[in-house]
Image (cartoon, coloured by chain):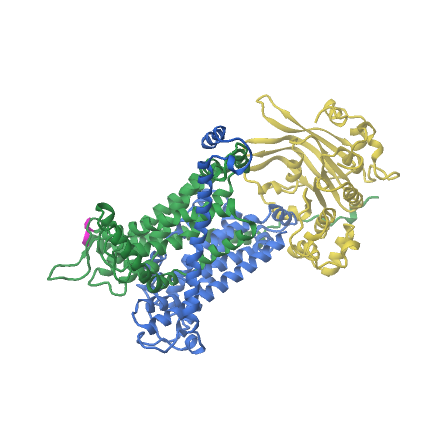
Amino acid sequence: MTTTVQAAQQPLSAPSGLGRGSLATRRRLANTLVRTGIWLSVIIAVVPVALVMYYVIAKGAKMISWDFLTKPIPRQLANPGGGIGPAIAGTLLMTGLASLLAIPLGVLGAIYLNEYGKQNALARSVRLMSNVMTGVPSIVMGLFIYTAVVLTTEQSGLAGALALACLMLPVVIRSSEEMLRLVPDELRQASLALGARKWRTIVTVVLPAAVSGIASGALLGVARAAGETAPIVLVVGLTQRVNWHLSGSNTALPVQIYRNATEPFEAATDRAWGAALTLVVIVLLATLISRLIANRFAIKER
Amino acid sequence: MTQITDRPPAQPLTARGRGAASDRAFSAVSLAAGALVLAILVLILVTTLREAWPALKYAGLGFVTSPSWVPLEVDGAGPVYGALSFVYGTTVVSIIALIFAVPISIGIALFLTELAPTRLRSTVVTVIDLLASIPSVVFGLWGIIVVGPALVKVYNGLHGALGDIPVLGSLFGEPVSSGRGFMTAGMIVAIMIIPIITSITREVFATVPDADKQAAYALGATQWEMIRGAVFPHSFGGMVGAVMLGLGRAMGETIAVALTIGAATQITPNLFAAGNTLASVIALNFGDPGVPPGRSALIALGVLLFAITVVINYAAAVVVRRADVRMKGASA
Amino acid sequence: MTATNDRPAVHIDAGWRHDGAERQPADGGAALMELRDVSVFYGDYEAVRGATLPVRQNEITAMIGPSGCGKSTILRALNRMNDLIRGARVTGTITYLGQDIYARDVDPIQVRRQIGMVFQKPNPFPKSIYENVAYGIKINNIKGNMDDMVEEALTGAALWDEVKDKLKTSGMALSGGQQQRLCIARTIAIKPAVILMDEPCSALDPIATGRIEDLMYELCKQYTIVIVTHNMQQAARVSHHTAFFTAEVDEKQVRHGRLVEFGETGRIFTNPKDPRTEGYITGRFG
């Protein structure tokens, strides 16, 4: 606050009046400079997004065809042809299973935090640790599943799904708890006063009141998980054919982008852009649906 | 007027049974789900440390002091596992990322809370959300194919202009022809951590009391003087937390870095040179880890990365929470 | 807050809503619930100290007093809603039909099933009007035709005519007064013996308040009602018996809610025995 006081004294020496010119040049300049900087930072952030989207669409669109989306992956990435069918299947399989694991567990965890634990020591540490867990690098989560699961079994879609589930869990817990916190306490009391047990109150009143917010947050977590590469590279192995089974090597879209990106051949690069467009479409669709659900929720709240 | 008969017959109040048991079961299940977070974190440490142990035992203290990483038998000499080059690479890439991302993120946050016209605000929020949802590997692909080659000319120009100046010259050395190196990786990571730093600083800025801002304006402050006098002092703690969270993300970023850093094991002041980070070296070499205990050594790098990021994220969470408490206390 | 708010307090007795109706029910006041030396604690803090009073069947019992006197706290003790607050505990005994509701083997769910509650702020569920009323019936597994039971409850809450054509619309879309009657319908749908009302009209306008007061009078033919109100005129208009609470500072400078006086409403308002009651109802303090 001292700076503003000092600054406010300056105009005494400046020509008096209320026009723009009456403000000391230095102050006006600083203000303009900062405002320009702020606008500039927005533009700087928009440019890469626009560029990435432009390249993904421009270079990816020409690759997209039914064959590309369904055909098996070529053994030699340098050769043109083939598709990314197995990668799409693997992404859907692993993200789907990860969601089935992480969303119910995450919502239950959030129920524990907001409805039971509240501010007790365990709940506080779970809350803090899920913040910490959100920041655990995905490659470390991959190493965890590698050491805990793959070493005793095999590289598989199941291992990939487990890694993704571990990454999604804290995200789902945090966003669900936020949503549960928004449910007014009066609703819980009304239900309890009607003789409902706590668990029925939670299942029949609290969860339905928060369901769109929870779904929206969970879907964002799903979108994030679908784009994860590092853990999949470690624990899933590689395959050229569609594998809808949880056992045996599998693959995913991000892995195919990664592998093709590292190859210096044009066919591989093209394939990488095509796969990137496919992945971005899947991720953005999930994000968009999440937005739509959240907006409907907002209207209902009003 | 006696209405006693209209009243439902008295029921015993003690009819416990399945109902109460189901309540206990539900709370136990939810508690187990919550505790799962703690269990996973402990398990991560236990299982990775167990697998990393052979390499850690083999390398000893050299694991953190040696800059050389030779996972092969060379002329009868055993493999060497020193993580120092990767720690250096991680640090350099993270610092570059923060230098770019922090001012831009704070700028965007200020734009959203102070400057933006209502209609533009939601557009910018959408763009930042879009930025957050683009997968890391797509940024990596863009970085390796578009950004790297495009930046080589810039790097060459900077090297030509500044290369002869004593200190600056060593920072802006000879670039790699593909453009892959610390600087490219750092800039790509910067883009990727902008959303998280922006969203937290924005939340922090939003908690600055309107009364403080108006007090500053009432004293004749310009917008910048108001920001400097009312917004920044109030939100300093939260901003520090946001930067730390961004740092944690930057250190853990893997695939985009693996694609754009050029994969070299070296410690050099040249920001345009190729290098490797803890995360990227694991991803790049896991399929081909060299002679035993090569894979164990890569897992050990993971343990190191895990430890560093947990400490940073824990500290960030504490800082953010403390700032949060202080601000709530002030407004109450 | 009601239209009659500015009427001089001394004439309050003339405000009894239902001329010609007897204030005292014919059964002479068999006590359905009894509070004996009830104190409520939040942690170490004793919010209410040593209240003893009966709740008579098919009557409206009003609890009045200045804010902070513990009247809502006592009300919430009557159906164990206080259990939901960490650290809250009750000493003394509260009986319902002779059973101690705080006995070890008592299930609070069963208590609340028979002693319902209507809250200060109307709190319908974000579900349809129909679902709101059907909720308690489903939860408690009450057998019968659901449509009939919902209609009966809405009729009982004097809301049926207003909502019968829009049962599928959200309960949140109703006006404040209608929402509160929906909450009453939701409560009587499960046919409790006692209905606790925690300042049920404080968020409503005078007209809506009047309708709720009329409704209370109708309801007490079938139910026993305990109402907490900060509005003395309301207590005078609707209740049969009145309990006056106040907040007192003890020798350790700690505030406690105390029950000052309990009696037939007409007498409390015209001939209070305790000077503190008299001071409050004539507006000298509180």
The colour assigned to chain A within the rendered structure: blue
B156 horizontally vs B28: left or right:
left
Q: Quadrant of the N terminus of chain C?
A: top right
Q: Which chain does green denote in the image?
A: B
Q: Position of residue C276 (x, y in %)?
A: 72, 24
Residue at image location 56% in from the left, 48% down from the top: A182
Q: Is residue C10 magenta?
A: no
B74 or B56: nearer the eye?
A: B74
Residue at image location 23% in from the left, 49% down from the top: B169
A233 or C191: nearer the eye?
A: A233
- Give residue A265's quadrant in the image: bottom left
Q: Is residue A143 visible?
A: yes
**Bounds of the magenta span?**
B58-62
Q: Which chain does yellow denote in the image?
A: C
Q: Position of residue A210 (x, y in %)?
A: 57, 54
C75 or B142: nearer the eye?
A: B142
Q: Main secondary structure of the magenta part?
A: helix
A295 horizontally vs C12: left or right:
left
Q: Position of residue B331 (x, y in %)?
A: 53, 36
For residue B34, above or below residue B140: above
Q: How many marks?
A: 0
- Give residue B262's quadrant in the image: bottom left
Q: Quadrant of the C terminus of chain C?
A: top right
Q: Which residue in the rendered view is the most extreme toward the left? A: B75
Q: Is residue B28 visible?
A: no
